[in-house]
């Protein structure tokens, strides 16, 4: 089934029938790609089992397309992942940011006339 083995980005719905929830998780986890998946259920236990055992980057529970808002990173898993960070969210901000620590202490001109001040005052 080419539609299931190729990673298609578009308005495509692929439905596959399996016997049990465990079979569904195993079936999905065997796919080399791990972009996104959706589960529709009213059973909270089944949803928790699914989200904890499925190996994909984006899991939708009762939502048709598990695409996050830009606040979160777009995540993939296995062959569906490019690098170790997503293009959105905190991870990309941290990736594109170099932190710099600059402790500073300023003195008035009168203090400077006595030479370099190396004291540390905690008041």
Image (cartoon, rainbow, N blue to C red):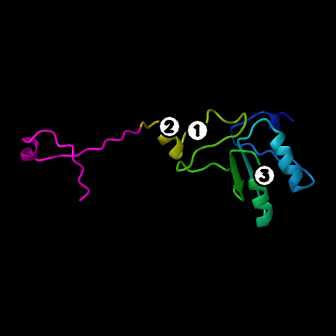
Residue count near mark 1 (Cα–Cα under 10 Å), binned few <14, some 14–19, many ≥20:
some
Closer to the camera in the image, 89 or 7:
89
Closer to the camera in the image, 91 or 113:
113
Q: Between disc 3 and disc 1, whose residue precedes?
A: 3
The x and y percentages for residue 22 are: 87, 53
Q: CA distance from mark 2 to mark 1?
A: 8 Å
Q: CA distance from mark 3 to mark 1?
A: 21 Å
Q: Between disc 2 and disc 1, whose residue precedes?
A: 1
Residue 82 forms part of the magenta stretch? no
Can residue 64 be seen?
Answer: no
The x and y percentages for residue 15 are: 83, 47
Q: Residue at x 80, y 44 (%)?
A: 14
Q: CA distance from mark 3 to mark 2?
A: 28 Å
Magenta extent: 99-123
User: In the rendered image, which quarter contains the N terminus?
Assistant: top right
The x and y percentages for residue 51 are: 74, 55
Please give left or right for residue 107 compared with residue 38 in the image.
Answer: left
Closer to the camera in the image, 25 or 68:
25
Q: Secondary structure at mark 1?
A: loop
Q: Secondary structure at mark 3?
A: helix
Mark 3 sits on what residue?
Answer: 53
Q: Secondary structure at mark 2?
A: helix
Mark 2 sits on what residue?
Answer: 95
User: In the rendered image, which quarter contains the C terminus?
Assistant: bottom left
Do tag 2 and tag 1 residues touch (Cβ < 8 Å)?
yes
Vertical comparison of 49 with 89: above or below: below
Dominant secondary structure, magenta: loop
Mark 1 sits on what residue?
Answer: 85
Q: Residue at x 50, y 37 (%)?
A: 95
Please give left or right for residue 85 compared with residue 103 in the image.
Answer: right
Residue 101 forms part of the magenta stretch? yes
């Amino acid at each position: 089934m080419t539609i299931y083995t190729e990673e298609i980005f578009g308005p495509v719905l692929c439905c596959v029938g399996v016997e049990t929830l465990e079979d569904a998780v195993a079936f999905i986890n065997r796919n080399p790609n791990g972009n996104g998946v959706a589960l529709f259920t009213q059973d909270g236990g089944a949803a928790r089992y699914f989200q904890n055992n499925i190996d994909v980057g984006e899991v939708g529970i009762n939502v048709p397309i598990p695409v996050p808002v830009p606040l979160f990173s777009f995540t993939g898993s296995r062959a569906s992942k490019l690098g170790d960070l997503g293009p959105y969210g905190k991870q990309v901000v941290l990736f594109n940011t170099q932190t710099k620590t600059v402790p500073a202490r300023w003195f008035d001109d009168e203090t400077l006339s006595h030479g370099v001040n190396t004291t540390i005052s905690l008041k």
